[in-house]
Amino acid sequence: MTDGSDRPRALERLLGGVSDDASGEFDQLSDARLVGDVLRRIRIHRRMGVGEIAKALDMPRRSYENLEAGRGRVSYDRIERFARAVDADPVAILATTVFRTPDAALHAVDNKLFLIAFVAAAELLEELGADVDQLDTRTIITAYDQVTRGLIDAARHRDTFAEDWLGRRAKGLGMSLSELFGRKRRP
């Protein structure tokens, strides 16, 4: 979980990948390529064609192809429209430029992890307003740590009730679950 300096790998990636040069400025071309790569991967994951996405974004096919190739103008509006068209997490797509990898967006494409975290933070700010500065760093870290550990536990020990129930019913029919669905059962 750590790199030896007691900082989580995600933080190291964030701190190490914030900029591409000593000035601290983002490399616009590099960001466009990262976003283009994640758009392409999500489109493929959704089994959608370039023309289908271009139409949904109301842009010429060639312009969308340039966007995926990292040669198009990246804007939040385009990312949001793309996310709506493919039912993806727009905040995770933006996080690609912070984490310097498309993995974050690809892993959160279905569950909207980053969007949910962003909305929760916005609700906290709306509720507390200026009082948000009364929260000390330790309290915030503890709260996020509890949420993170709970999500890790939920992902590793997911509820298998439905699969177990179907397995028992399939067995009653003299079939295996894999025969019932034509696939192997998850561990």
Image: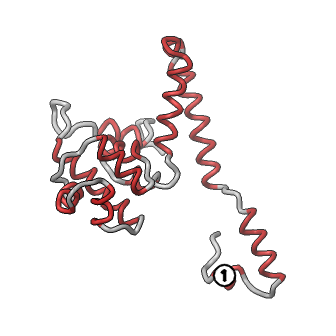
User: Where's residue 181, x and y in %?
Assistant: 65, 80
Does 38 sit left or right of 166 as displayed? Answer: left
Which quadrant: the C terminus?
bottom right
User: Where's residue 81, x and y in %?
Assistant: 35, 48
Of residue 139 and residue 35, the one placed in the foreground of this image is: 35
Residue at (50% x, 20% y) in the render: 137
Of residue 119 and residue 104, the one placed in the foreground of this image is: 119
* Residue 180 falls in image quadrant: bottom right
Dot 1: element? helix
Residue at (60% x, 80% y) in the render: 183
Residue at (28% x, 50% y) in the render: 35
User: Where's residue 11, x and y in %?
Assistant: 40, 37
User: Where's residue 68, x and y in %?
Assistant: 24, 58
* Residue 87 falls in image quadrant: bottom left
Residue at (43% x, 36% y) in the render: 7
Q: Which residue is mark 1?
A: 178
Does 174 sit left or right of 86 as displayed? Answer: right
Q: Is residue 68 above or below residue 7?
A: below
Does 73 sit left or right of 56 as displayed? Answer: left
Q: Name the residue furthest bottom.
A: 174
Q: Is residue 65 above or below residue 98?
A: below
Of residue 48 and residue 114, the one placed in the foreground of this image is: 48
Q: Residue type at mark 1?
A: Ser
Does 113 sit left or right of 47 as displayed? Answer: right
Query: What coloring was used for the rendering?
Result: secondary structure
